[in-house]
Amino acid sequence: MTRATRGRSASNPSPTTDLRWVSVGQERLTRPRGHVIMPAGDMDTMPEEFPEDLPPASPEETGEAEALAPDSSGMNLLSHWQERLIQFGLGEALLRVGTHVLSLFVTLIVIALMQSLYRSAPVTSEVQAAAPTPTPVVAVAAVPPPSDISLQGIPRLSQIHTTIPSRPRLEITTYTVQPGDTIFGIAEKFGLKPQTILWGNYYTLLDDPHNLMPGQELVILPVDGTYYEWQEGDGLNGVAKFFGVTPEDIINFPGNHLDPETIGDYSHPNIEPGTWLIIPGGKREFVSWSAPVGVTRENPAIARVLGPGACDPVYGGPVGYGSFVWPTNKHYLSGFDYSPETNHRGIDIAGYEGEGVYAADAGVVVYAGWNDYGYGNMIMIDHGNGFQTLYAHLSAIYVGCGQGVGRGDPIGAIGSTGRSSGPHLHFELMHTYYSKLNPWDFLPPP
């Protein structure tokens, strides 16, 4: 199209021309424009309102402009995707996501910078603090090294005290009984059972804790068990069986100093008579010096072994109620408690010399008099229902053999006769079928 034609079309546009003009205008409005380098003179003469009236560029100018214009394919692709995202309504979301990513990136950079500054700050302060202060140098005379110091190691002072690790005791030791000592207290002091104190000192205590007196020298075993003096004709099998252990338990205990290689035949071992042996873990029955169970009015003769206070058979008389009262005015202990472990089968009730002793239940007196085995003056009452009661260490006896008594009747006075460490009443409760019982289970609460 020539300039004249374009002029006429502009002055008298036809419908076809108008539609083409609109189409071209829309294309020009939506197409990204390139940059064209033009001479300054041409810029001055270029119309501002109707750029379409410019003369067409020559082929040389068109080629030169295309060569100088930047490549718009990448920008067209970006614009295309941007238009598509806007059509789908994702433009605003993309903008928010990009903003958040950028904010996060900036925050991470700030944190990294702060950490680097924080780490470097203490080092700087330490370096500044460590700056040396000039001090005058004092010349010191050289001291020759001692000639007697060994260079083989670092010398140190010897320790005056030597710590010896605790080892189990294997030998016998002795202990002198002090005022106030008890079997339980001595056993606890050496980490032993109370029975072991009695079993290790049979000839001193005779299995009776009442025989413990101040000044006595007791044998203290190194372990729980018994102490046995070897007799002529003894055999290891028999001795071990009696105490409930094996022959090897006796032979292998270091404190017995027995050699398994030279012990010989177990039935006739090479052990000298009179040798005391520790029986580790050994047990035996206590020898009872108390009244036997079952001293009844019909058969009181079994108590004759106890001393001259035994009675003849008695027929008839009061029968007990089966319930008991306290035999003294005081209702608390003053001495030993009920303790089968130490062969103490009764309770020692407190009282002053001469205070009254009362029958714990109705019955008949089957023993009244002296006891040869440490109980001193003693009374036994058969209650006719299987129960018997015993009252020992009395200072006085108010009843006689075969006499019937009621519950709570006075029968004697508190004393300290026999093997006793002070005034008190030794009280026992027994039953024909159940042997010796704990009085605490039958007396009323104190």
Image (tube, helix red, strand yellow):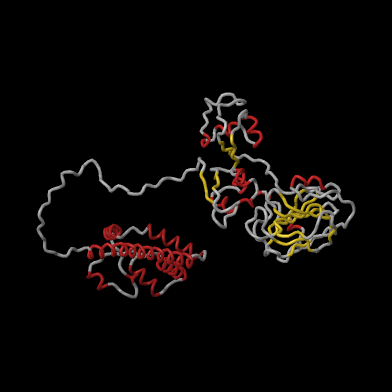
Q: Nearer the viewer, residue 428 or 1?
A: 428
Q: Quadrant of the C terminus?
A: bottom right
Name which residue lies at 73% across and 60% down: 396
Q: Is residue 336 left or right of residue 403?
A: left
* Residue furthest to the top: 265
Q: Nearer the viewer, residue 238 or 65?
A: 238
Q: Quadrant of the N terminus?
A: bottom left
Name which residue lies at 82% across and 48% down: 300
Residue 152 in the image: above or below residue 120: above
Q: Nearer the viewer, residue 406 or 66?
A: 406
* Residue furthest to the right: 316
Residue 189 in the image: above or below residue 29: above
Determine the image quadrant of residue 51: bottom left
Q: Position of residue 422 (x, y in %)?
A: 63, 59
Determine the image quadrant of residue 214: bottom right
Q: Position of residue 345 (x, y in %)?
A: 70, 51
Residue 80 in the image: above or below residue 169: below
Name which residue lies at 74% across and 47% down: 306
